[in-house]
Amino acid sequence: MRASTSTAHRSDAAGAAAMFDTESLYNRRADKRWDRVCVGDITERMTWSRPDDVAIVGWEGAYSSPEFASLTWRKADELANRVANMLLDHGLRRGDRLMLACENSVEAFVAKLGAAKVGVVAASLNPAFAPDVVRYLALHLSPSFVIVDGGTRPEVVEALEGAGAPVNVTIRIDGEVFAGSADFAAEVARHSSVEPVATVHGDDIWEILFTSGTTAMPKAVMLSHTYAYLAAHGFALSFTRGVDIESHVTLVAFLPVVYHIGDQILSLPALVAGGKLVIGRRSDAQGTAQAVIAHRATAVWGGSPQSVKQISVELEALAPAEKTLSVIVYGWGAVEPPVLARLESVARSGFQLVGIFGQTESISCHRFWPVVQREKFESAGSTVNYVGVPSPLLASTVFDVDGNDLVLQGVTGVAGEAVYRSPVTMAGYYRDPEATAQAFSGGWFHSGDSCLVGEDGMRTMVDRYKDIIKSGGENVSSLRVEARLHAHPAVLKAAVVGLAHARWGEAVTAFVVPRTPDLTGDELLVWARAGLAGFESPKRVVFVEALPETVGGKVMKYRLRTQWADLYAERASSSSFIQNA
């Protein structure tokens, strides 16, 4: 008996040893349960330290059932396991695509983590996409499983079905369960909460996100597990400023974190730090401020400067008795100095405002710290969009039109294209090798953003190349003009584009959402000219009720250019402004 047992032990040991490569020093594969990099493991690993701490909270409207309103690490992991096993039981395997057409919710967010556990790729599209875009993306990705919200537009569901991707599961928010699909809560309850067995490697793609598609159909950006981990940990360093230990961070995110790059850097950081994430359904300045107070939040993803301004006003109105806020992150423009002062009045001592600059394809980002660099920040006002310097995860320089490296040449104050190298860079555009090769021309990722470098190394974003206005032989930064307009107290939002003009080539044109009804175009033009060069000043102001915006709050300027292409045609009014367009 002893000999038989000993032989069995030796056989087991030999079998186990065969699993380990102790010879190769490169081309290795860390894809075992104990050493892999997998986004889906984030919740499981926290069950070994703080299983009963709250991990994910849904603000009102961001969950379909009370059972999902607040999840501890244990409950979040069990839900992710149920989703993973649901996908496996439906026949999905590593590399298959799960398509989601969902706004923010606890269920949709955790569903992506569940897919990651078994190597299924989450492909989340913006539910606001036009039906033809939805059909194109579904055909391009060939998803094996589809999850939507009850409030997803019927034409989007029809487009999915027309592309051979019928809805499998509906999250019952903003509407009822779609015919032929199952209710999310009921469906996941049928599947095991036990951790599934699967092989996942850090270089596997965990998520596909889609570009805005401003000039063509959106491109499908391939993001790996390693990309997500490094991005999240990199931003956790910023979001955990001011807390005693990193797991005490509470991050509020009302901007999209299901189908936007915000999930990698503006929600996952709270989880990889062991903290708490509060998810809001949609962009809502008042709700964000209320969530900060209700959950004693330490960090907020603020979005655009205009969004941050609205949040600051709401926080000031609520006058929190306990000041817990330590960090707000913003992007896409310059924050006005009075907004920083207002935030400091409602935040804890040592508050930091952090400006970031990056994009879905490469999101380790530049960082700008207005509090630390206050003199530069305040002297520029909102007319200069400082984006700081590259983060430690990012190599970035600026190329001129001939491909010359302006930083290496010591050239300052000259605009060129920002280019990137980083482990937090996409693997490519799915099934689009030509676009991928073009994006990585010369061994750098080309951002499409125009930047310049100052003598102190500080980067300034000039504009997106496609948004630079060529007027009367001069290049005009639309961001600079917008910053001047936003500084007017009666302007709620503004966007500036170039429109075809017989004399100027492109005329600088401002589209403005007024804060008060008594604002006039003439008043605004005088204001603009007082702070801008003549060639930068708008030739016309168009007042509108709303601007066409992406989910993150960026204005879709191509829509303005298309809709108003004939504004300066001969038959157009000669007035310097158009009221209530």
Image (cartoon, grey):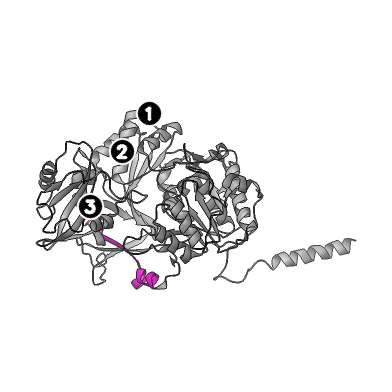
Quarter occupied by the N terminus: bottom right
Report which residue position mark 1 lands on: 320
State the residue position of label 2: 310
Q: In screen coordinates, is 65 left or right of 430?
A: right
The mark nearer the N terminus, 1 or 2, is: 2
In percent of width and height, residue 326 lies at 38, 38
Coordinates of residue 168 in the picture (x, y in percent): 56, 54
Task: Classify mark 3: helix, strand or loop.
Answer: helix
Residue 52: image quadrant is: top right
Count of all numbered marks drawn on residues in the image: 3
Q: Which residue is mark 3?
A: 479
The label on residue 47 is none
Residue at the spot x=31%, y=63% of the render?
215
Q: Which residues are magenta?
A: 434-463
Name the mark nearer the viewer: 3 or 1: 3
Q: Nearer the viewer, residue 90 or 289?
A: 90
Kind of residue indicated by mark 2: Gln
